Image: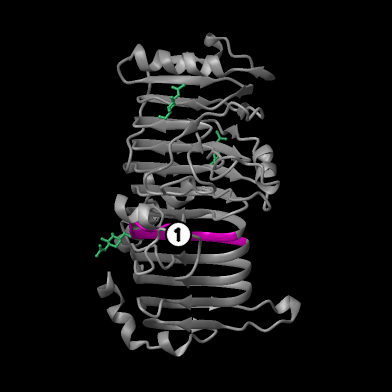
Amino acid sequence: MLRFAISLLLCFSTVAPFLTSIALAEMITCSGIVPMRYRNDKISITDFGAVGDGRTLNTKAFQAAIYRIQHLRRRGGTLLYIPPGVYVTASFNLTSHMTLYLARGAVIKATQDTSNWPLIAPLPSYGRGRELPGGRYMSFIHGDGVRDVIITGENGTIDGQGDVWWNMWRQRTLQFTRPNLIEFMNSRHIIISNVIFRNSPFWNIHPVYCSNVVVRYVTILAPADSPNTDGVDPDSSSHVCIEDSYISTGDDLVAVKSGWDEYGIVYGRRSSGITIRRITGSSPFAGIAVGSETSGGVENVFAENINLFNMGVGIHVKTNIGRGGIIRNITISDVYIENARKGIKISGNVGDHPDDGFNPNALPVVKGITIKNVWGVKVQQAGLIQGLRNSPFTGICLSNINLRGAELTGSRSPGWECSDVSGGSNQVSPGLCSELSSTASISSCSSHF
Ligand SMILES: *[C@@H]1O[C@H](CO)[C@@H](O)[C@H](O)[C@H]1NC(C)=O
Ligand SMILES: *[C@@H]1O[C@H](CO)[C@@H](O)[C@H](O)[C@H]1NC(C)=O
Ligand SMILES: *[C@@H]1O[C@H](CO)[C@@H](O)[C@H](O)[C@H]1NC(C)=O
């Protein structure tokens, strides 16, 4: 495919320069955001006594290897090699200037003994654990205040063995908020690529208070009924790029967040410069989501070439009263949706509150959302766009959208429901509600950023 594109490019380059610029534009990737580093210094987890038999607990080996990387710093950093085999371990921390490299057939598996799982402080922008008050269980693989970290290899697997956690959630026996599979906090220059993530206890990949994060060529898998297993959740982070990945989980595939109600408003750290492209997947919840925790603000999000199958909602922008925060300049284009309850949902009354201390006058502001080139089949309802009476959503612009109803079940698509919104549209089928049907105002859409 690439070779074909290049030869096409070569043969047209002399006759049609405009074609080459189109071809080059299509090859834009995340790679410039974080430099890929080659590590001269390499160590193997087996040098530290790890046994990949699927039974031995290797926590000490992981801690010793990372201690060695941290305290015997080598120029250019160190690569920690995980050979083929199944390495069970408790959660562990990463350090700066390292590559965690999983060979083909290497599996890092979370222990199912959850009794001594480390607890850490709640995120200041959430004020408490997302699920339960108090602290939260540390992510399986954790990095706090690190930089220049790469998790990569030959598509080895990081397996959270989440079912013990999902069952505690179902049986209401959890004491604190479940662990993410991977979390980076206060970190920068992170690359996660060519790894398979399976069965996360909670959200899969959670960069929070980070900048310059690349997630590409990953596969993220969790059963459709696994609770809250979001794929990638950039949270109060900037310059995050997610591309060329397959994500099939029990919750939103990608959800851009920035803190929760009064805690997120005080912390005040936005998410911005988020790029999402060439993602395929399925989920009973949303494909591309903004929210619902957006109290620090979310801006400059660009998503394109998204293919969604068997979805709850294709595109979902969600916030709530008490949340505050500005959501602006969100562009989502070239989306294919097959079999979904709803194509597009933008709503101001979604998600719960951390406690009774939220300010009901803290209204979110939503403006400048462009959604274009969306093709959907078997979509039960085209869309629901509901702003807030005291904070109407503005600059909501939809163009070239065709969402077809569930012909196979014979039900008729109820089309769109809108309230407290303004904006414009062009070529939307089924026909959009009157609030958004003006084609004249579409030219002014970008002025709402
Ligand atoms: C791992 O990092 C967390 C959060 O920074 C810290 O509380 C914990 O003590 C660290 N654990 C180890 C074993 O270093
Ligand atoms: C790993 O998976 C990615 C994404 O699915 C794929 O593009 C890549 O070719 C695979 N790499 C190897 C070494 O198998
Ligand atoms: C809107 O966001 C895009 C990224 O999606 C960015 O390139 C552009 O500069 C932003 N526009 C404004 C006015 O901030």
Outermost residue, front side: 356
- Range of magenta residues: 285-309
Classify residue 190 by image quadrant.
Answer: top left
Q: Which residue is drawn at 37% across and 46% down?
A: 30
The residue pinned by badge 1 equals 356
Q: In which quarter of the image is the C terminus?
A: bottom left
Magenta stretch prevailing secondary structure: strand
Q: Which residue is drawn at 63% across and 18% down?
A: 57
Identify the residue at horizontal 62%, vertical 52% (top origin).
Answer: 250
Q: Horizontally, is 132 left or right of 114 in the view?
A: left
Residue most extreme to the right:
409
Mark 1 lies within 8 Å of ligand 1 (Cβ measured): no
Question: Above or below — where is 14 with respect to 420?
Answer: above
Can residue 193 be found in the magenta stretch?
no
| x and y, in percent, of residue 447 in the image | 25, 74
Q: State yes or no: residue 304 in magenta.
A: yes
Residue 216 in view in this figure: no
- Disc 1 crowd rating (10 Å Cα; few below 14, some 14-19, many 20+) is few
Residue 77 in the image: x percent, y percent? 35, 20
Residue 199 sits in which quadrant? top right
User: Where does the image place residue 310, in percent across and percent down from the top left?
Assistant: 65, 62
